[in-house]
Amino acid sequence: MLLGVNLTSLTKVLRCAKDDDIRTLHAADEADVLNLVYEAKNSDCIVEYDMKLMDIDADTLTIPETKYDARVTLPSS
């Protein structure tokens, strides 16, 4: 799943939550919005945000499986 998220906007929305809030992010397949839900741990308060996703024209890159021959020894002290 590819999500085109504006990181500046996402950071602003994530900072709205308190440290003990439960954060849930939802995005359906082929979705055009990212749904963020904050649930307050000590109350019945639920806040919901819908963030519009950006349309990114990107090719999926595959990383080939590669074996590396190496032995690394590190001292423990």
Image: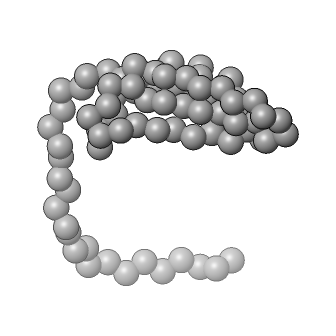
Q: Is residue 4 left or right of residue 63?
A: right
Quarter in which the N terminus is drawn: top left
Question: Residue 39 lies in what quarter of the image?
Answer: top right
Name the one closer to the observer, 30 or 77.
30
Name the one closer to the observer, 6 or 21.
21
Quarter in which the C terminus is drawn: bottom right
Name the one closer to the observer, 67 or 65.
65
Residue 60 percent across, percent down from the top left: 17, 43
Query: In this rendering, is residue 72 above or below 36?
Result: below
Question: Residue 47 lies in what quarter of the image?
Answer: top right
Q: Is residue 35 visible?
A: yes
Q: In the image as oriented, which residue stretches furthest toward the front?
A: 44
Q: Is residue 69 left or right of residue 49?
A: left
Question: Residue 58 lies in what quarter of the image?
Answer: top left
Residue 9 percent across, percent down from the top left: 50, 18
Q: Is residue 19 visible?
A: no
Q: Is residue 49 left or right of residue 67?
A: right
Residue 64 percent across, percent down from the top left: 16, 61
Q: Residue at x 14, y 37 (%)?
A: 59
Query: In this rendering, is residue 59 above or below 11?
Result: below
